[in-house]
Image (cartoon, rainbow, N blue to C red):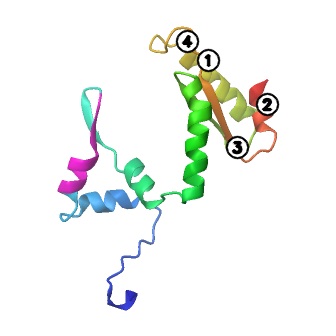
């Protein structure tokens, strides 16, 4: 019965993780749970873990994801997500430059070609990336 529950309604575009991290009831636990090192600094990474918990996929979707990971991701040492939100040529060019820069970077494993995952609202964008 929800009538007995207190409900918080957030009416803004602000990420609610920041709101929780500023609340004295949650801030210490969230910092302990989500702090992670990033080079020489430590950052509070709330978004990823909290979103994965809140937006947990259904069992069928989870099964499809695990199958995809087993089939596609285990084939290469690295994977890259290539997003072309609208599937425009500008997004394609920017993404290709980014991948070229990563492959040329000194930290990229030698002779390791990534599995490239493409996501886009544009129907033909995947074919453009394949070329």
Which class describes the residues within 10 Å of circle 4: few (<14), some (14-19), or many (20+)? few
As drawn, the label of residue 78 is none
Marks 1,4: beta carbons within 8 A: yes
Mark positioned earlier in the residue sequence (4 or 2): 4
Task: Please determine whether, in this image, residue 116 is positioned above or below residue 119.
Answer: above
Q: Quadrant of the C terminus?
A: top right
Q: Closer to the camera, 33 or 9?
A: 33
Q: CA distance from mark 1 to mark 2?
A: 16 Å
Q: Residue at x 48, y 58 (%)?
A: 56
Q: Which residue is mark 2?
A: 128
> Can the viewer see residue 81?
no
Which class describes the residues within 10 Å of circle 1: few (<14), some (14-19), or many (20+)? few
Left or right placement of residue 65 versus residue 35 in this view: right
Q: Residue at x 61, y 48 (%)?
A: 64
Left or right placement of residue 83 versus residue 51 in this view: right
Q: Which residues are magenta?
A: 28-38
Q: CA distance from mark 4 to mark 2?
A: 22 Å
Q: Which residue is mark 3?
A: 120
Q: Secondary structure at mark 4?
A: helix
Dominant secondary-structure state across the stretch colored magenta? helix
Mark positioned earlier in the residue sequence (1 or 3): 1
Q: So how many labels did they put on this image? A: 4
Name the spot of residue 66 as percent of width and height, x first. Answer: 55, 43
Which class describes the residues within 10 Å of circle 2: few (<14), some (14-19), or many (20+)? few
Q: Which residue is mark 4?
A: 104
Q: CA distance from mark 2 to mark 3?
A: 11 Å
């Amino acid at each position: 019965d929800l009538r007995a529950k207190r409900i918080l309604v957030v009416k803004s575009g602000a990420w609610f993780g920041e709101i929780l991290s500023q609340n004295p009831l949650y801030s210490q636990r969230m910092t302990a749970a989500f702090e992670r090192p990033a080079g020489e600094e430590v950052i509070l990474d709330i978004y990823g873990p909290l979103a994965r918990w809140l937006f947990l996929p259904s069992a069928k979707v989870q099964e499809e994801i695990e199958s995809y990971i087993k089939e596609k991701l285990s084939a290469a040492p690295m994977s890259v997500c290539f997003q072309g939100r609208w599937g425009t040529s500008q997004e394609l060019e920017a993404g290709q430059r980014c991948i070229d820069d990563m492959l040329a970077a000194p930290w990229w494993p030698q002779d390791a070609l990534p599995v490239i995952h493409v996501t886009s609202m544009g129907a033909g964008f995947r074919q453009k990336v394949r070329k």
